[in-house]
Image (cartoon, helix red, strand yellow):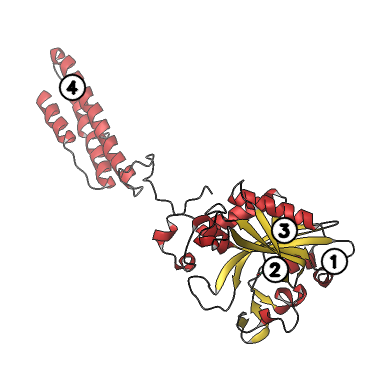
Amino acid sequence: MIDKIKILLSEIEQLIVSAPEEVEAARIKYLGKKGTISSLMDDFRTIAPEQKREVGMRLNELKQKATEKIESLKKQFEDSSTGYGDVDLSRTSYPIPLGTRHPLSIVKEEICDIFKRLGFSIAEGPEVEDDWHVFSSLNFADDHPARDMQDTFFIQSDPQIVLRTHTSSVQTRVMEKTAPPIRIICPGRVYRNEAISYRAHCFFHQVEALYIDKDVSFADLKQALLFFAREMFGEKTRIRLRPSYFPFTEPSAEMDISCNICGGKGCPFCKHTGWVEILGCGMVDPNVLENCGIDSKTYSGYALGMGIERITNLKYQVKDLRMFSENDVRFLEQFQSAH
Ligand code: DAH
């Protein structure tokens, strides 16, 4: 009997199965009510008393080993039925290389963040616009050169529908719908029909800011500009306002900052002047307020607009504008952001 048990034990230990049904068949064969182990148990009653102890121990061992083996065979199919085999699902994943943000997005967010800290909120508008929002409402005379075919892309030769040439169109859209106080910042893409070169592109990006309330003065504008320049380019940055002209602001100005490349001493970037121009601004022309249904006797406001590419160039010294739209990863990978 001991020999029988030994043979059975090694048979069970070497058992190999290829399907769950075979496991069940093996279980019935060895552990079932009429299985081999049960019949050995029956035989056990008939053996000589002096053998009972040893045979009993071996029989119990056989039964236990057989049960364990069947269990482990069952498990083998349970695991592989998940489709993952012996993959450890609790392991940490392999590191996935992260992409980087586009430099224009990094700078756009930085500009918006600075204005958000002054209480401005984001407003957006359509890139395909009508003449009213891009030009007429903003006080552009009918014969203003900015409407020229040279600059503006028209949609389906309809002179009333254009690709916006500046984000100032969002000013009008918000003023038409919102009662003052208004404090908005409008980032977005704009289009101009220009020959593409290292200095110009047919599309680029702007950020526009507009503040309308009672008693808004040029001093408020200047304060916001100084705050912006210092936050963006560093504490030591100085600003300079030069009189200028825009149809939608009166008075109008252009703002220069002390060249942040040479610190104002003079270098090729600032053409040895120590100053670089970064934005246009002014007090919103009363005609524009009236065009949008805002009483210009009660309210006044300031507006400013800047090119994101220009600010990005100042921060990162990108020499060729075309790099921004070519999507060359060797260029893009150089920009890391905290966002
Ligand atoms: N819209 C102007 C442009 O595209 C930029 C600008 C100038 C915006 C003065 C303003 C502003 O809001 O007050 O060149």
x, y (%) of residue 202?
Answer: 55, 75
Q: Amino acid at mark 2?
A: Ser
Q: Earlier in the sequence, mark 3 or mark 1?
A: 3
Element under disc 1: loop
Residue for point 36% across, 47% down = 82
- Mark 1 lies within 8 Å of ligand 1 (Cβ measured): no
Residue 168 image label: 2
Q: Amino acid at mark 1?
A: Ile
Q: Amino acid at mark 4?
A: Arg
On the rendered structure, is 339 left or right of 24?
right
Q: Residues within 10 Å of mark 1 (few under 14, many from 20)?
A: many
Quadrant of res 144 = bottom right
Q: Amino acid at mark 3?
A: Ile
Residue named by callout 4: 58
Q: Nearer the viewer, residue 183 or 227?
A: 227
Q: Nearer the viewer, residue 264 or 19?
A: 264
